[in-house]
Amino acid sequence: MLSTGEEGTRLGSLSQIEDGGFAEAEATLDGDAESLILHRDGDHVRAWLNICPHAGRRLDWAPGQFLKSRDGHLVCAVHGATFETTDGLCIAGPCRGESLRPVAVEVQDGEVVLTPEPPPTP
């Protein structure tokens, strides 16, 4: 389980993320500045560290710009690893079977905020 930063830290507004889309946010986790991937699914948001498990590089092709497959999966811009948006599992590419590292977030009054522990698996 990944520890998170200070509970309640605001990461952005839900309205700034297109439904089904991705956004990047910065947060301090375990004392380190980290880039996060946020994925909106209706009124819910999931978050992961912006680090591909294959080579340890960021997944975005430019800051905050993520590739999405025709099926809506997140695609690593470097080596093409493809991740499910429900759980961060790599379903294609060089790190198949590995997962992105989740970060606990929730939506409170229209704002995406850090929470103390990862959300339950749907």
Image (spheres, helix red, strand yellow):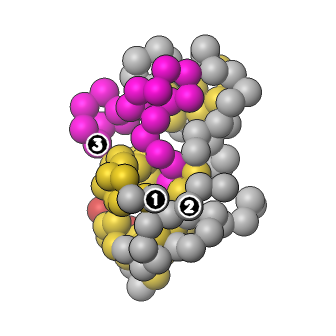
Quadrant position of residue 27: bottom left
For the magenta stretch, what is the residue range? 47-67
Residue 59 shows in this picture: yes
Q: Does the magenta stretch include residue 2?
A: no
Locate residue 5, reporting x and y percent.
44, 67
Percent x, y of residue 26 = 31, 55
Q: Where residue 14 appears, x then y in whole percent? A: 38, 68
Please identify, in this view, whether the residue under mark 3 or under mark 2 is nearer the observer. 2
In the image, what residue occupies the spot 39% across and 59% down? 31
Label of residue 89 in the image: none
Distance from disc 2 to disc 1, alpha carbons, whole Å, reads: 6 Å
Disc 2, SS? loop
Q: What element carries label 3?
A: loop
Callout 2 amino acid: Ser
Above or below for 92 versus 58: above
Which residue type carries mark 3? Gly
* In the image, residue 53 lies in the stretch drawn in magenta: yes
Q: Which of marks 3 and 1 is in front?
A: 1
Q: Which mark is residue 64?
A: 3
Instruction: Say which residue appears at 37% left-offset and 74% top-offset.
Output: 9
Tag 2 near tag 1, CB within 8 Å: yes
Q: Above or below — where is 30 with respect to 61?
A: below
Circle on res. 30: 1
Residue that mark 2 sits on = 3
